[in-house]
Image (cartoon, grey):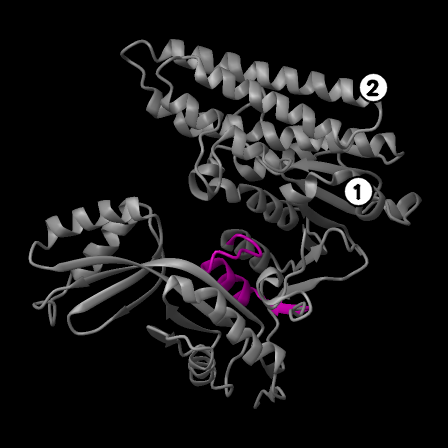
Amino acid sequence: MTHTVEKIGGTSMSRVNELRDTLFIGGREGEDLYGRVFVVSAFGGITDLLLEHKKSGKAGAYATFVGDDSDHAWHDSLDRVAEAMMAAHRAVLDNPADVERADAFVGDRVLGARNCLIDLQRLCSYGHFRLSEHMGQTRELLSGLGEAHSAFVTTLMLQRAGVNARFVDLSGWRDEGDVSLEERISGAMDGVDPMHEMPIVTGYAQCAEGLMGEFDRGYSEVTFSQLAAMTGAREAIIHKEFHLSSADPRLVGEEAVKKLGRTNYDVADQLSNMGMEAIHPKAAKTLRQSGVPLRVTNAFEPNDPGTLIDDQPTDEAAVEIVTGLDIIALEVFEQDMLGVKGYDAAILEVLTRHEVRIVAKVSNANTITHYVDASLKTMRRVQKDLAALYPSADISARTLAMASVIGRDLNGLSVLTRGLQAIAGAGLEAIGASQGPRNVDVQFILERDALKPAIKALHAAFIEARTPKLSRVA
């Protein structure tokens, strides 16, 4: 038996003092405490203050620094970050000496970041240097403050409780910057013995590849999966504040949902496509290729095994999850499209340039429709570029929603037919529906105000009133 690598998200981290007595320690003593490596996110809300609010887009320190004309507003943003960090660790640390050390840690890191940004502004006041060329590094510098803080505070808390915890800082603070992710992890873990100590590792890792450039705020799961793969973990575990369930319990009711218990990486990918990430797809790929199974648990129910995600097929066909997503339908109609190559490639190029995420696509003789996850503001720019390419085309963008019924094996369940019947039975109308030949998901296109009642109707039809499962035919 070897160690596990376990990740704790930001919302759960804000209650890390509760996790001390359950997840971290619980009833364990001596060597039973160890054999576990924890990768931690920043405390809830801190990354929003450091960068920008994930949902509202409200500017944090990074966004303020980028757009600051007064040269003062970003200083105030950093002050708010420091205040929020101190409030976060004072809510979970009991010992005054630990609070004092955590305050000093915040002061040192925030001051260092502030001085770095001042120097960068001064450098870029010369015509040979452009601030825009350093935005990626600036975003990474600021983001790394959050995970470094939470990992340091967690280590202090556990050491005070008698745990041999070790702070493992991957943020590259005043270290060599030109190292790969593998080199960053292997260097930091050199000499660490997870079987006799508890490493508390930052979710952000500074490396030459620049994690935020490709993964943005999904970087902590990439760090987590790479660490699990490199160290040969027995299992990779993600602790969330909820179980991976058959639907959102706030929507269909806690008494109606069912914990998955077991699924596979294919289902995890479908969930990511619907914006309901069990794990980032690139992180899942790393775990899958290294043969490390993934477990998703409720952090506050440490005795529940949660849901195991691996590459094993199911023995019986069944719907596992019903979820949904607000989308925009980008429709390009061109009468002369039939038989002419290049339309789709050009549309994809424009969508890629504007960093629009495609959820699904349908087409016929003269129309190509992409269902995308993007803002209307972005889509107006896309429409403008496409109109310049195809001035005679009719290009429209319409706000819609997509409900998806997902399972490892949907063969023989007539999900498309029964789903349309369930939607109609709820007094709703599906604008469109699609099912691929692999039979792992069926998608229903709806008006936005119909999404929530449609999910409830589909969940009732496939999960709550589940018919006997069909055995897979060998």
Q: Counting other residues with Cα less than 10 Å from the Cα at mark 2, is it few (<14), some (14-19), or many (20 or more)?
A: few
**Residue pictured at 47% horizontal, 63% vertical:** 324
Q: What is the x, y in percent for residue 132? A: 33, 24
Write down the residue under mark 2. 97
**Residue pictured at 72% horizontal, 28% vertical:** 89
What is the secondary structure assignment of the residue under circle 1? helix
153 with respect to 412 (left or right):
right
What is the number of the mark on residue 18? 1
Q: Which residues fall within the magenta stretch?
A: 261-280
**Residue pictured at 69% horizontal, 40% vertical:** 13
What is the secondary structure assignment of the residue under circle 2? helix
Q: What is the x, y in percent for residue 312? A: 62, 72
Q: What is the x, y in percent for residue 215? A: 47, 43
Choose mark 2 or mark 1, whichever is in front: 1
**Kind of residue at disc 2:** Ala
**Residue pictured at 42% horizontal, 30% vertical:** 136
**Kind of residue at disc 1:** Glu
Query: Split into 4 quadrants, where in the image is the C terminus?
Result: bottom right
What is the number of the mark on residue 27? none
Dot 2 or dot 1, earlier in sequence: 1
400 with respect to 348 (left or right):
right
